[in-house]
Amino acid sequence: MIEDFTASKMARDSDKPVLLWFRQDLRLADNPALCAAMASGQPVLPVYILDDETPGAWRTGGAARWWLHHSLAALSRDLDALSTPLVLRRGDSRQIIADLVSETGATAVYWNRCYEPFARKRDETIKAALKRDGIAARSFNSALLHEPWTVENKAGEPFRVYSAFWRACLAKDGPETPLPAPEALESAPAPQGDRLADWALLPTVPNWARSFETAWTPGEAGARDRLTGFLDAAVNRYKAERDRPDIEATSRLSPHLHFGEIGPRQIWHATQAAMAAGGASEASALKFLSEVGWREFAHHLLYHNDTLPDHPLRPEFADFPWHENGDALAAWQRGRTGFPIVDAGMRELWATGWMHNRVRMIVASFLVKDLLIPWQEGEAWFWDTLVDADLANNAASWQWVAGCGADAAPYFRIFNPVLQGEKFDPDGAYVRRWVPELAKMPASHIHKPWLAPDDVMRQAGVTLGETYPTPIVDHGTARDRALDAFSRIKKAA
Ligand code: FAD
């Protein structure tokens, strides 16, 4: 009798769905939570929750919302091809998961892990609540090569220096082989969901994201094409040219990685395969993977330091004498500082939702050191305007530039925006592209138009203060002011 009951209960449970909760893993290939849900033998019910409540100030920013819309549309299409609908719900994830479990009778909820402090807290609460109700909750790693608790130094502590961290990662067993995408999926009857369009993730009037469309193809297929294109064409230029914003020598995978349309294991194995086949030179390919290593490092830092997005890792920087200056901040945000490489970067960011890494470092240094504006202001602007806005990478990088992070650039190393422009955009092509009012300036003067002779300015049609701003600071004076500010915290420390 008991056996009959158990058998019929098992039969009933096997008809009940497993909720597959998509978060920052918007892909079907190499998705361990999806594979485990399929392996359960139960029907799978995929869901995405737009939760603007849990992250607080770090809710998805404007440009990333544009990406999210298109990425969800792509994921929905890919699931439709497997006759499985993606259920969309909006609100506090804790409540929505509880609602979905009770509406569908799901016996389990599976997801891939996130590492933001608010996400970890949320997931712990949800896991505890599900377990209390007898619902299975399982989580997996889809986002990192090695999870934060698996890489530590000899003292059993997290690394604070990138080079030692990456060496330790390379000494570990290589990341597992990526899982294939499913060819078929047993789906469950879907409960009522929202319409993606009703979430209003896309800008309307003005449509500031119009030019994003020519720059990007969000979604898993777009990510795959981007990686293949990079490994086929640009990877061998990566080591030598990755610092040149005028040349497309980097992968531009960052937004795809942030949304989990592709995972680092896939990148790792595809790059190793390209090396083994002789298509990718070892020096360039390993340099590329080491940058993926910076992403890992940033995620580990965030995991071990909850306050990374808001507070300096080096505590003495809490008393740094910043100068709040609304006008200078606005000039920086709009790309109207009068320093061409800075303005080109900020305008590239506005137009495409992305900026080249070298230029990110230049504009960040300019904000924090030439203008003495707190790094958190720059971090917040990037958060709203980058399609790849990522809590770990953004916070760790801003702290790195500001000199207050782990393994940071020393504060006294202050980028000269003119020399940086001349070195990394030697012909001025990048500036000409994004600052069209300087398009006719010769390369010799394009990075310092205020020093150009009158006849050069006349021929280029540039009048400072009219067609293009005069520099908002004198770099030499600003540099001395920054060093003076730094010496004050050094004395205090
Ligand atoms: P590639 O050079 O092709 O590198 C491959 C991948 O490695 C990238 O997609 C990225 O995931 C990772 N990566 C590369 N460089 C870094 C780095 N320095 N730190 C962490 N990961 C890295 N990156 C983000 O993804 N999101 C952010 O919000 C972000 N904010 C930044 C803010 C500042 C001030 C600075 C200086 C850098 C920031 N970065 C951020 C890091 C870096 O600029 C971008 O990851 C990179 O420019 C993306 O271009 P790519 O995909 O062509 O990189």
Image (spheres, rainbow, N blue to C red):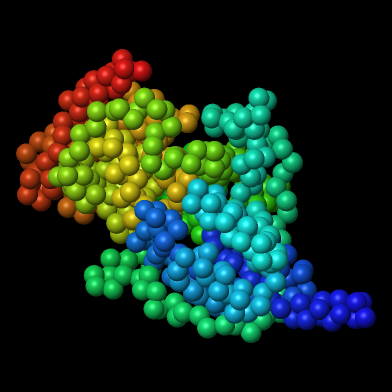
Residue 92, how many percent across, how many down? 47, 65
Q: How many labels were placed on the picture? A: 0
Residue 116, how many percent across, how many down? 50, 49
Q: Nearer the viewer, residue 479 or 114?
A: 114
**Residue 278 vertical position relative to residue 225 in the rendered view, above or below:** above
Q: Residue at x 51, y 68 (%)?
A: 95
Q: Residue at x 20, y 38 (%)?
A: 324
Q: Residue furthest front?
A: 1
146 on left or right of 461: right
Q: Residue at x 60, y 82 (%)?
A: 190
123 on left or right of 460: right
Report the quarter where the N terminus lies.
Answer: bottom right
**Residue 55 vertical position relative to residue 21 in the rendered view, above or below:** above
Residue 120 appears anywhere in the view: yes
Q: Nearer the viewer, residue 41 or 331?
A: 41
287 on left or right of 397: right
**Residue 254 vertical position relative to residue 33 in the rendered view, above or below:** above
Q: Nearer the viewer, residue 378 or 100?
A: 100
Q: Residue furthest top?
A: 491
Report the quarter where the C terminus lies.
Answer: top left
79 on left or right of 402: right
Q: Residue at x 7, y 49 (%)?
A: 466
